[in-house]
Image (cartoon, rainbow, N blue to C red):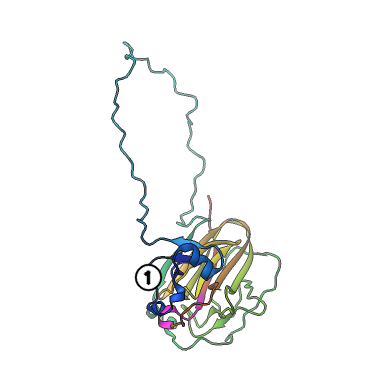
Amino acid sequence: HPSIEEVKTCSNSLNYPPEWDNVPTIFFADYESCCEGYYKSPCKKHDACAPPTLPPTEAPTSKPTTKPTYSPTKKPTEAPTHAPTNVPTTEPTSSPTNSSTIPPTTTQISSTTSPSSSPSATKTSSPSSSPTSPLTNSTQTQFTPITSATDNFEGENPLPWILGNPPQWTIDSTVSIQGENSIRNLPPIGNGATSDLSLRIDLPTSALIRCEAKVDIHMPFDSFEYLIDGEKRAVMTSNKPGWTSVVTGVSPGEHTVVFRVKNADMVPPIPRVEDRFGTGFVWLDMCMISPVSTR
C-alpha cells in the first residue's frame, strides 16, 4: 500500500489509516503492482519486515594460526640519530574558529517551542485568506546580495521573497511565534502541485539560513520540503506539534532557497481528517540569514 510516512513509497507496514480496510483498491499484491497501480511510475520500497540495519562492529584482530617464517635479528637496529625531515616543526598558523555545530552543507530540524509557550503562538482562529500587512512579492531574476537579515513578516520586508505568480504564500495574522504575523502557504491545487516560497540570494561568506516552522501536513496528502539549489535538504511528511527550527548551512555565492508544500502525486483514497492528517498548511516565522566565520 502507499506509505503514509515517506513520499512516493510503497510499504508493507501495518501503519496505515484504519479507513483503508474498507478500500481494497489501495492494497496490492507486491511492490511493483503498488508503484504502478498507485503512482503510475517506479517508486521507493519499504519493507517493514526487514531487520534493521545495524552499524558494523569492530571485529578483534584474529589470532595468527602459523608461526613467523623468519627469526629476529640478534641485534636491534639502532635508532636514528636525527629527527625525520618530514615531521612539521611548527604548529599550523591558523585554525577554524567557527563554533557553529551546523557546517555549511548540513541541515538540522529540531523542535523549539510548543504553542503554549508563546502568547502569540496560541492564536487558534482560522487562517486568514488575505494578507493583513504588506508583503512585497519580488519578481527578481538576479541574485540579491545579502550578508545578514531577519524577517518576522511584520511589514519591513528585509528579505526579497518570491511568492509566485499568482502568489502561492500569504501573510497570516492568526498564527505566529513572535509578533503578530507569519507567512503561510496557499493550498496547491492538483496532484503533485506545489506552493513555493523562494529566495535568490548572493552570499559573501558561508551562512546559516534558519526559519521557525509550524508544520501541519501529512502524507498521503502532502509534504513539506526545504531545498537549496534544487537539492532537498529536508523533507517532512507528518505534522509536528508546536514550532520546529529548520536550519541549514550554505557556502558563499549565489543560491536559490525554496520552501515547498507539495501535494501527493495521486488522489488519496480516504477523506482528509484534520485531527489526523493536518490542514495542509505550513507557517514560517522568524526567518534569518546569519554569516558563519570559517576561520
Labels in figure, total: 1
Asked if the stretch drawn in magenta spans residue 280, the answer is yes
Q: Secondary structure at mark 1?
A: loop
Question: Of residues 204 and 199, which is closer to you in this image?
Answer: 199
The answer to whether residue 119 is seen in the rendering is: no
Res. 42 in view: yes
List the single residue furthest toward the top: 74
Verify whether residue 140 appears in magenta. Answer: no
Query: Residue at coordinates 58% horizontally, 87% vertically from top-left?
Result: 130
Residue drawn at point x = 43 percent, y = 83 percent? 273
Q: Is residue 62 above or below residue 102?
A: above
Location of residue 120 (image quadrant): bottom left
Query: Does 6 sit above or below residue 188?
Result: above
Residue 33, x across and y down, in percent: 49, 65
Identify the residue at horizontal 51%, vertical 86% (top origin): 127
Magenta span: 274-284
Residue 25 drawn at (x, y percent): 46, 75
Amino acid type at circle 1 is: Asn
Q: Which residue is mark 1?
A: 15
